[in-house]
Image (spheres, rainbow, N blue to C red):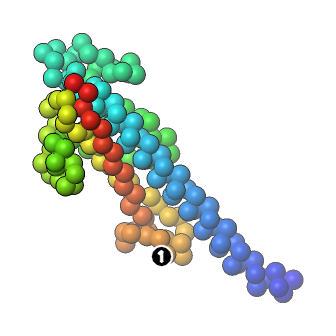
Amino acid sequence: MVEFALVAPVAFLLLLGIIITGVVVTNYIQLTNAARDGARLAAICGSGVNQPAPATTQMPDGSGFCSAANIQQYIKNHLVSVPLAQLPTVTVCSPADALSGACVANGSGIGSCQSGKIVEVDMSYDQPLYVPLISNLLQTNANGTRTITASAQATCEQ
């Protein structure tokens, strides 16, 4: 009994740490996959925004018409366990800006998607860490959360 009393708190803390790390990794994977899917959708759909009547161009998944707002909402709807407070940023930039990391700063809206340009989707989420002792070890913010970021790029189709 004495040995169990000494080992149990450490084992419980270790188990809790493994569970919380699993939640963080799962949410990171989901955020990354949603960014990748959104960038691909924006690359396919971006040329439809340039058309004279974008309301007639359907998104490839059939969920609505091609627009920046619908693409952002598509990404947000496909995040099951990650409640984003803000919509992801969808920008279009030149390949040189994408390589230098200046896509968001020098990018424009989805309406400027042309063949050869790069669509970039950026988003972040403040993942709560739930247990103060665990959050002291893993947090990146003072409020006990860890910021998870995801970014994905795709080349405009047309």
Between 126 and 156, the one lying in front of the other is 156
Q: Can residue 67 be spotted in the picture?
A: no
How many numbered badges does the structure rendering display?
1
Residue 21, x across and y down, in percent: 56, 62
Between 87 and 34, the one lying in front of the other is 34
In the displayed structure, does residue 138 sit left or right of residue 147?
right
Quarter of the rendering occupied by the N terminus: bottom right
Quarter of the rendering occupied by the C terminus: top left
At 24% from the left and 12% from the top, the residue drawn is 56
Instruction: Determine which quarter of the picture holds residue 118.
Output: top left
Asked if residue 29 is positioned above or below residue 126 in the image, the reply reads above
Q: Give the secondary structure at mark 1.
A: helix
Residue 33, x across and y down, in percent: 44, 42
Between 158 and 119, the one lying in front of the other is 158
Give, as a three-letter code, the residue at label 1: Asn
Residue 134, x across and y down, in percent: 53, 72
Asked if residue 56 is positioned above or below residue 141 in the image, the reply reads above
Instruction: Determine which quarter of the picture holds residue 109.
Output: top left
Asked if residue 91 is positioned above or below residue 102 in the image, the reply reads above
Instruction: Determine which quarter of the picture holds residue 45.
Output: top left
In the displayed structure, does residue 149 sit left or right of residue 69?
right
Residue 117, x across and y down, in percent: 19, 36
Q: Can residue 150 be spotted in the picture?
A: yes
At 42% from the left and 64% from the top, the residue drawn is 146
At 54% from the left and 76% from the top, the residue drawn is 133
Asked if residue 102 is positioned above or below residue 5 in the image, the reply reads above
At 40% from the left and 57% from the top, the residue drawn is 148
Q: Mark 1: few, some, or many residues within 10 Å (few <14, many ≥20)?
A: some
Instruction: List the single residue furthest toward the right.
Output: 1
- Residue ID for mark 1: 136
